[in-house]
Amino acid sequence: MDAGGHHLGLFWRMGHRTALRQGDWKIVWNGNRSLPRTFELYRLDRDISETRNLAAENPRRLEDLASIWADVNRRMADPD
C-alpha cells in the first residue's frame, strides 16, 4: 500500500515490456525507448484478451495508472 492507503496493484517487466494492473484496469507499455512513452489501457473484466485499447476514452484513468507506474518504475532497478 502507498502512504494514502491505496493498493498499488501489480507491476511487472518482461524484457522491455512493462505493465501495471490495479483492479480490473491494466496499462501496458511496449518499452520502445526510441518513441515517446505511450501506454495502452485495458479493462480486463470486459476485455480479458486486451483487444480494445481504452486510453483515448479514459484519459483520467490512464493518467492515474501511469502516475503509479512511474512511481513504481522509478524505484526499480534499470532493466539494462
Image (spheres, rainbow, N blue to C red):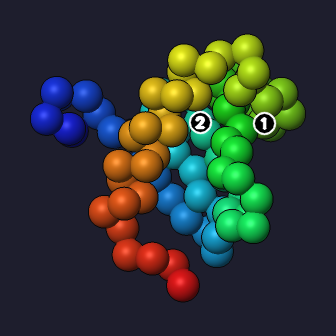
Residue where numbered disc 2 is placed: 26
Q: Quadrant of residue 27?
A: top right
Left or right of residue 14, residue 69 in this image: left
Q: Image quarter for residue 50?
A: top right
* Residue plotted at (48% across, 33% down): 65
* Residue 36: image location, x then y, percent: 70, 53
Q: Is residue 52 found left or right of 80 in the rendered image?
A: right
Instruction: Give the class, few, some or many, for how many residues have Cα within 10 Å of label 1's Cα (few <14, many ≥20).
Output: some
Q: Residue furthest right?
A: 51
Q: Position of residue 26 (x, y in %)?
A: 59, 36
The circle drawn on residue 50 is 1
Relative height, residue 54 to residue 80 (above, below): above
Q: Say if mark 1 contacts mark 2, CB within 8 Å.
A: yes
Q: Secondary structure at mark 1?
A: loop
Q: Quadrant of the N terminus?
A: top left
Q: Nearer the viewer, residue 52 or 55?
A: 55
Task: Check disc 2 and give the amino acid type.
Answer: Lys
Q: Residue furthest bottom?
A: 80
Question: At x 36% / y 53%, what residue is drawn?
Answer: 72
